[in-house]
Each structure stands twice: as C-alpha cells, then as structure tokens.
Image: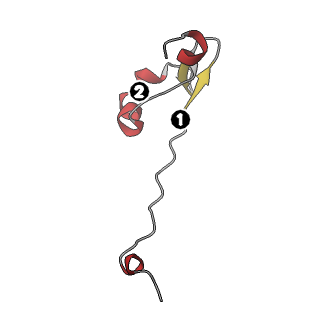
Amino acid sequence: MRPFVWNYARPAELSPVIDQYSYDPILQLNVLTDGRPAIMDRALLAAVGTTTSKAGSATHFDD
C-alpha cells in the first residue's frame, strides 16, 4: 500500500548552480572571475539574492 501523498508528490527541481564569484581572503570580499567585487554585477545579485561570505564571522563578534 502506497501512502496517499505519493499520488501527488513530484520530484524536486534542481536549482541552477551559479558559481561566478568566490571569496578573496585578502580583500575580504566576494569577487567575480575577472577580479571585480561581486557587488558590481547587479544581474548576478538579482539571480542569487546575496553574496554571503565568511568575512564578517571572521572579523566581527556580533555577526
């Protein structure tokens, strides 16, 4: 016997992976592949919603 919900469950769609920036520990910024700060690419920010990094947690106690 199958659970009722299996009649309506759909497989989750995979989110597209956007890997166009990386963290630069020297600048303590997320940077694009060409070296510019990630904040400069508004289309990228709109697509990913944020550019979180570990810079704050490494330098501030209140993050």
- Would you call the spot at circle 2 few (<14 residues within 10 Å), some (14-19), or many (20 or more)? few
Look at the numbered discs 1 and 2 and tell me whether their residues touch, using CB distance below 8 Å: yes
Q: Find residue 63 and report its horizontal and vertical position in percent.
A: 49, 17
Q: Find residue 46 and report its horizontal and vertical position in percent.
A: 35, 35
Residue at 42% across, 21% down: 39
Residue at 54% across, 10% down: 60
Left-right relation of 10 to 25: left
Label 2: state its secondary structure: loop
Q: Quadrant location of residue 43?
A: top left
Residue at 58% across, 14% down: 28
Q: Kindly identify which numbered label has been placed on residue 41.
A: 2
Label 1: state its secondary structure: loop
Vertical arrangement, residue 13 with respect to residue 4, above or below: above
Q: Find residue 12 and report its horizontal and vertical position in percent.
A: 45, 63
- What's the colour scheme? secondary structure
Q: Earlier in the sequence, mark 1 or mark 2?
A: 1
Q: CA distance from mark 1 to mark 2?
A: 10 Å
Left-right relation of 43 to 2: left
Under mark 1, the amino acid is Gln
Q: Kindly identify which numbered label has been placed on residue 20.
A: 1
Vertical arrangement, residue 56 with respect to residue 52, above or below: above
